[in-house]
Image (cartoon, helix red, strand yellow):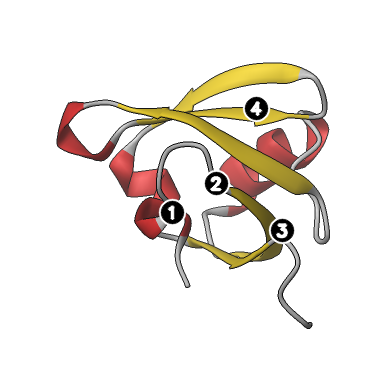
Amino acid sequence: MLLKDVGAGQRCVVEGVDLPFQMERRLEALGMTRQAEISVVNRKGKGILIVKLRGSRFALGYQITKQITVRLAGDPA
């Protein structure tokens, strides 16, 4: 499943990131690594998500969230 499809209030675990090298490294520096848990705090218009990651909140645009693969927290790997 893609991060863009996760609903507000749901938790998920990062499975993979398919972004350009520099953007992928920047997200890794912010803590978005494989097996990191993300909570979707809110959904804004045009696919923007407010997510909570390792105690910090970030806004991620549609072009980013459609390239991050996740699974819902609690689902088997």
Contact between marks 1 and 2 (CB within 8 A): the answer is yes
Residue 27 coordinates in the image, percent (x, y): 68, 38
Tell me the distance, in whole angstroms, between the alpha carbons under discs 4 and 2.
Answer: 11 Å
Q: Position of residue 52 (x, y in %)?
A: 65, 27
**Mark 4 vs mark 3, CA separation in Å:** 12 Å
Q: Label 3 vs label 1: CA separation?
A: 11 Å
* Circle number at residue 52: 4
| Viewer-proximal residue among 55 and 21 | 55
- Under mark 4, the amino acid is Lys
- Disc 4 is placed on an element classified as strand
Give the image location of residue 32, x and y in percent.
74, 43
Q: Residue at x 81, y 50 (%)?
A: 36
Three-letter code, disc 3: Val
- Crowding around mark 3 (Cα neighbors within 10 Å: few <14, some 14 to 19, many 20+) is many
Q: Is residue 55 above or below residue 35?
A: above
**Residue tagged by mark 3?**
13
Residue type pointed to by label 2 = Gln
Mark 2 Cα within 10 Å, few/some/many (few <14, many 20+)? some
Helix, strand or loop under label 3 = strand
> Which residue is at 80% across, 20% downward?
55
Disc on the earlier residue, 4 or 2: 2
Residue 56 placement, left or right of 59? right
Question: Which disc is residue 70 wearing?
Answer: none
Label at residue 6? 1
The residue wearing badge 2 is: 10
Amino acid of disc 1: Val
Which tag is nearer the camera, tag 2 or tag 3? Answer: 2
Above or below: residue 32 compared with residue 72: above
* Element marked by disc 2: loop
- In three-dimensional space, the C-alpha distance between marks 4 and 1, rounded to whole angstroms, equals 13 Å
- Using a 10 Å C-alpha cutoff, classify the residue at mark 4 as few (fewer than 14 neighbours), some (14 to 19) or many (20 or more): some
| Disc 1 versus disc 2: nearer the observer | 2
